[in-house]
Image (cartoon, rainbow, N blue to C red):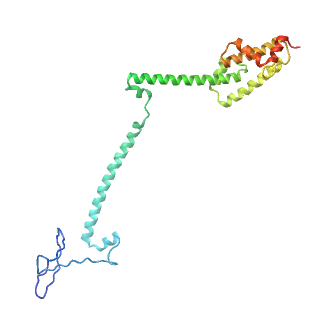
Amino acid sequence: MPKMLTQSNPQAALVDLSLSAVALCNEGANSRADILLYKRKETNSMPKTFEELMAALDTDAAAVVTKHIETLRAADQATIKNLQGEVDTLKTAAPAAQAPAHEEDVLKGASPEIRALFEKMQGTVNQLLAAQAASVVEERYQKCKALPCEEATLREVLKSASPATVSILEAAANAIAEGLHKATGTSASGTIKTGTADEAYAALEKSAKTIAAEQGITFEKAFTEACQRDPDTYKKYVEGVR
């Protein structure tokens, strides 16, 4: 409370004021009152850390501040706990939500038109893959057909063989073919070296079968081309080997 003003005490200090607004004016409403406000700038005496501030407060004030801080911390801990519970729930549900859908599940709710289009596209893809696989097997078989093995069995082996395995089989087939050529008097390309007209024809026949398979033409046409490719063997076939 302010002290009573007297002639000997013209000044008073006001404490515990409740101000709703502060305004500047040229002349106060009370001509007998001049109120001066001071803002003090502290230097070394002002606390610079929270610990210094708490140490500067009296016991009751420090207790109020501490209680308020603990209340805020408790509220924050409760919020964090709730958020952690939500995160755990989402983690538990995540694998089921991210599980890949099977083809049947995808098409389960599709219209008949969409299902038919999908099946058509799948059939086209399967045909392309089968044709590609057959082409690879045919190419491998042509390189390894000299191996002493039934054609069906050899094709089945070549279908799933690795490139390294195919390379080994091809080398073995070439060695076998070279041995046969030497035994029958033909070169590696099938050209007759020695022997009879029948052996010359056998070389031309083998070459014609290969050409027919590669070009998809008749044996007769392939035989003609084989003769054109190897005129020396054809000459020996016609005239006989001397």
List x then y, in percent, for residue 90.
37, 43
Instruction: Name the residue rendered at 27%, 78% in the picture.
Output: 40
Q: Check the picture and name the quadrant holding the C terminus.
A: top right
List x then y, in percent, for residue 221.
70, 13
* Residue 17 relative to residue 95: left or right: left
Q: Nearer the viewer, residue 49 or 14?
A: 14
Q: Check the picture and name the quadrant holding the N terminus.
A: bottom left
Q: Nearer the viewer, residue 44 or 64?
A: 44
Query: Which of the 4 image quarters holds residue 234?
Result: top right
Residue farthest along the front direction in this orientation:
228
Q: Work out whether 84 lies above or below 72.
A: above
* Residue 122 relative to residue 30: left or right: right
List x then y, in percent, for residue 109.
37, 26
Query: Which of the 4 image quarters holds residue 34?
Result: bottom left
Instruction: Name the residue rendered at 33%, 52% in the picture.
Output: 80
* Residue 21 relative to residue 136: left or right: left
Q: Work out whether 121 lies above or below 203.
A: below
Instruction: Name the residue rendered at 29%, 61% in the picture.
Output: 70
Q: Work out whether 188 lies above or below 195.
A: below
Residue farthest along the bottom direction in this orientation:
8
List x then y, in percent, for residue 190.
78, 19
* Tag count: 0
Instruction: Name the residue rendered at 55%, 24% in the picture.
Output: 128
